[in-house]
Amino acid sequence: MTNTTLRSVISDARLVAGKDLRLEWRSRVTLNQLLPFALLVLVLFAFALDPDRSVLKDATPGLFWLAVLFSTLLAIQRAFAVETVDGIIDALRISGLDPAGIFLGKAAGIALHLLVVEAALLVGVTVMYGASPSGLLLVVATSIAATAGLAAAGAVYGVLAAGLRVRDTLLPILWLPVVAPLLIGATQAFGSAYEKSSGAGWRWCGLLGAFAVLYTAIGFVAFEPLLEES
């Protein structure tokens, strides 16, 4: 990829991400839907497992990432639902924007929404579960790497399902098995951060970074034909 092409991709990605963020600013979907949903999931987990905080502390990493996973599905569906209204996705195809740039823009928009949700969830598990990590740097690095992978895979499968009538039910079936390694790795890394054994956690974080790069590379290659078929 030449420097000129790379600049074009980045410029197109900024346009797409900016559009999505402006839509979010007007609709307040993250504030009014994603955040309440994610926090409600934490509350339900607390009631379903045990009122004993020691149990919740031990389960915090897994519960945190399950809440993120459910919230990601809503974010992906929202990101591509706006494109299917009034044929906007057709406008994207003929806009002249680089498909790789569209992919990066959609993934970046999803990732930014998720990072806001994750910040709120970290506060939520600290207050409700009484769990606070000792390895804050590992938590931040894990969140960024896992979020990048979730968003990249979400952008690929989101455009794949966008043109289908059953996209709301098909998307979880397609997407969840693919991101299972991310859920496992992020849970293990968080577990190390909360258990004060960050050495193993950094290895899991490195694996998450590798998956994020892999899913991003797949998106660069696969997004254009999927966009044409959607």
Image: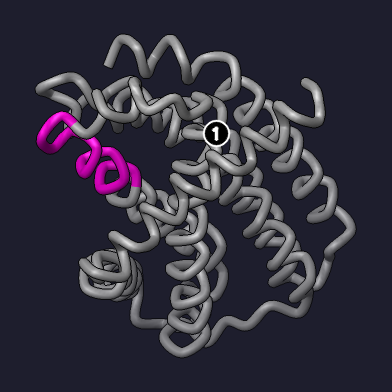
Q: Which of the 4 image quarters holds residue 219? A: top right
Does 193 sit above or below residue 158?
below
Left or right: where 224 falls relative to 186: left
Q: Position of residue 91 (x, y in %)?
A: 27, 28
Q: Which residue corresponds to the image point at 52% horizontal and 85% vertical from the top-left? A: 126
- Residue at the right extreme? 199
**Can residue 47 be seen at all in this image of the molecule?**
no
Q: Position of residue 78 (x, y in %)?
A: 25, 48
Bin the neighbour count of mark 1 within 10 Å (Cα to Cα): few under 14, some 14-19, many 20 and up. Answer: many
Q: Which residue corresponds to the image point at 63% horizontal and 83% vertical from the top-left? A: 132
| Colour treatment of the image | one colour
Does 34 sit above or below residue 218?
below
Front-lying residue, 152 or 19: 19
Q: Position of residue 51 (x, y in %)?
A: 34, 81
Mark 1 residue type: Gly
Left or right: where 86 falls relative to 23: left
Does 29 sit above or below residue 149?
below
* Magenta part of the chain: 76-87
